[in-house]
């Protein structure tokens, strides 16, 4: 198969072999099963692209199923955010289900296992159960409650459901093999008592199934053919198989692939929650967060994330992907779609001494050279302009092709200028740069054949609008935030300069009415309009620089 189809990943090879052999009636049915206990992140995006992408490729279906078996951590806020993220990425589920939809069926199957002598109620504490399981190299110790009669177990389990017992006092365990080298097979817990209100079922239940019990059976009920999980579930597969085989129900095939790990990034939902709760970030959609909502707010496009997931590919072994690849994918797409505009973020005034007083020209500027259909816009040009402070140096090094005293540059879309002198304040800081322009060098004039090595951007002082610009950098200043010395946590690796807020000058044409989502501030980077913007106060987030800076 791999020889004939070298471009197929190993999951596609499995699926194509199944289709060839007529397995599952030659159908493909996948699912994406997040727990609604937080916002999705870039790692989930890879799984979304994989599960929905496989269903689309093989004319199958992909379900969205919420693994809502832990009511103390789950919320409808997370449910809605997950649905929004999936649709924003460009996918649509065939069906939407909840593990809680199957609580009654799961309960009935648990009773069946009890009646077949394959499950029992255990009064042991969590510590006692953990100790009894032992270690992989030595057999575990059987619970003193393991040989309760079927009748007693059934009575106790029904009373657990009825709410007669307090939290933590009893659990239901599968009776499998306390000598198994796989710790997950040593009488795993199927149900625990939890008197908590569920976001969907309310207070109907006070016992809740464990993930390992609910997951495979939920797959089975939905007719899933290929249950695709990340590698940490490989050791859970024998238990997944045991439940399906023992209950004699439809048995999906679990296939594991490497999860996505990114440098300079935390992917643990628990740690992301900590960042939010301790207010190290502005919320789940903070543009520094690896959440899909954070990436969206920062200005990443859905296409760039899908392309990233495809570029990373599907592997069998865990590895760490450099976050610069994600940034590269963003640049690739933004270069095609971003509207060009000029913005000056660290301004110094440029005065053209020989430009006519009071004269204003309307110059043509290209909106997107990658898409001529977007046309041009008019940009006002006058005697006084704002330019970037970094575009001028009094004593420049070699190969500095921007402005210096006696040097010439072209003002983009406008004229060639020559710097004559500068004005400084009492502290020696440059407050004004003075120059002369050459009228015959206006861009687009056929008679202008003057060539200079440097081109800089600008904004007319008279027409400039102020805007808040948020310059985002990586949230952590080390490649592996979890690599901590004794006494440290990942919090200690937070980059104190991950957010810098400045006021810049932008073209007057930018406003909420004609705004687009993505911009390229020419010569600076890619930016997007933030949701905090108002008509009188535009806010822009930096997505990525024009080139990699690391």
Image (cartoon, grey):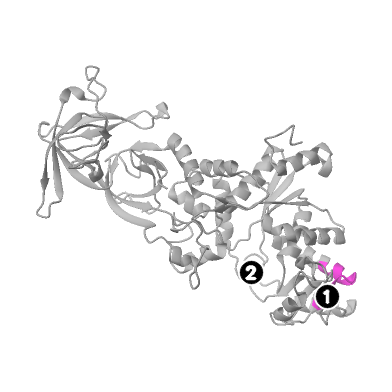
Residue at x 43%, y 36% (from the top left corner)? 335
For this rendering, which residue is in front, 164 or 260?
A: 260
Whether residue 97 is visible: no
Q: Secondary structure at mark 2?
A: loop
Give percent across and percent down for residue 344: 27, 44
> x%, y% of residue 522?
33, 38
SS of the residue at dot 1?
Answer: strand
Whether residue 277 is situated above or below residue 456 in the rendered picture: below
- Locate the N terminus and report the quarter of the image it occupies: top right
Dot placed on the residue nearer the N-terminal end, 2 or 1: 2
Residue picked out by circle 1? 120
Name the foreground residue: 200 vs 490.
490
Answer whether residue 117 is magenta in the image: yes
> Vertically, is 362 above or below 98?
above
* Whole-percent x, y for residue 300 in the image: 47, 46
Q: Residues within 10 Å of mark 1 (few under 14, many from 20)?
A: many
Badge 2 crowding class, 10 Å Cα cut-off, few under 14, some 14 to 19, many 20 or more, is: many
Can you identify the residue that label 2 sits on?
71
- Confirm whether residue 351 shows in the render: yes
Give the mark toward the camera: 2 or 1: 1
Residue numbers of the magenta segment: 110-121
């Amino acid at each position: 198969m791999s020889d004939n189809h070298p471009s197929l990943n190993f999951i596609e090879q499995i699926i194509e072999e199944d289709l060839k052999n007529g397995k599952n009636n030659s159908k493909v049915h996948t699912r994406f099963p997040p727990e609604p206990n937080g916002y999705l992140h870039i790692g989930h995006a890879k799984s979304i692209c994989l599960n929905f992408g496989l269903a689309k490729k093989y004319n199958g279906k992909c379900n969205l199923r919420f693994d809502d078996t832990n009511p103390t951590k789950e919320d409808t806020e997370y449910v809605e955010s997950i649905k929004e993220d999936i649709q924003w990425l460009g996918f649509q589920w065939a069906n939407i289900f909840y593990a809680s939809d199957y609580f009654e069926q799961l309960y009935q199957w648990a009773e069946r296992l009890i009646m077949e002598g394959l499950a029992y109620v255990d009064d042991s504490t969590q510590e006692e159960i953990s100790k009894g399981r032992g270690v992989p190299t030595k057999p575990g110790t059987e619970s003193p409650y393991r040989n309760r009669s079927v009748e007693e177990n059934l009575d106790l389990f029904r009373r657990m459901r009825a709410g007669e017992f307090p939290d933590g006092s009893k659990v239901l365990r599968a009776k499998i093999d306390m000598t198994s080298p796989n710790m997950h097979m040593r009488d795993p817990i199927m149900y625990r008592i939890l008197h908590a209100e569920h976001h969907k079922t309310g207070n109907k239940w006070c016992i809740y199934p464990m993930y390992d019990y609910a997951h495979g059976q939920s797959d089975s009920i939905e007719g899933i053919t290929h249950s695709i999980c990340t590698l940490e579930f490989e050791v859970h597969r024998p238990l997944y198989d045991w439940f399906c085989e023992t209950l004699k129900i439809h048995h999906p095939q679990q296939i594991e692939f490497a999860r996505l790990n990114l440098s300079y990034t935390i992917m643990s939902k628990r740690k992301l929650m900590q960042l939010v709760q301790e207010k190290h970030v502005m919320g789940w959609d903070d543009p520094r967060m690896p959440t899909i909502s954070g990436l969206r707010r920062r200005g990443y496009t859905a296409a760039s994330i899908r392309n990233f997931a495809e570029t990373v590919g599907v592997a069998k072994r865990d590895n760490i992907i450099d976050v610069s690849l994600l940034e590269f994918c963003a640049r690739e797409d933004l270069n095609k779609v971003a509207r060009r505009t000029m913005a000056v973020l660290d301004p110094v005034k440029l005065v053209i001494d020989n430009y006519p007083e009071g004269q204003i020209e309307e110059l043509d500027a290209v909106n997107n050279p990658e898409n001529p259909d977007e046309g041009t816009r008019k940009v006002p040009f006058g005697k006084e302009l704002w330019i970037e402070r970094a575009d001028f140096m009094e004593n420049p090094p070699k190969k500095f092709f921007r402005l210096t005293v006696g040097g010439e540059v072209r003002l983009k879309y406008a004229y060639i200028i020559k710097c004559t002198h500068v004005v400084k304040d009492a502290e020696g800081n440059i407050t004004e740069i003075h120059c002369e322009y050459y009228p015959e060098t206006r861009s687009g004039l056929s008679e202008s054949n003057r060539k200079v090595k440097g081109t800089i951007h600008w904004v007319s002082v008279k027409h400039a609008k102020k805007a808040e610009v948020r310059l985002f950098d990586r949230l952590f200043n080390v490649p592996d935030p979890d690599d901590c010395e004794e006494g440290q946590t990942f919090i200690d690796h937070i980059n104190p300069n991950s957010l810098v807020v400045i006021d810049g000058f932008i073209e007057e044409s930018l406003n909420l009415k004609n705004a687009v989502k993505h911009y390229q501030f020419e010569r600076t980077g890619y930016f997007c309009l933030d949701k905090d913007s108002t008509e009188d106060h535009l806010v822009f987030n930096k997505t990525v620089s024009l080139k990699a800076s690391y």
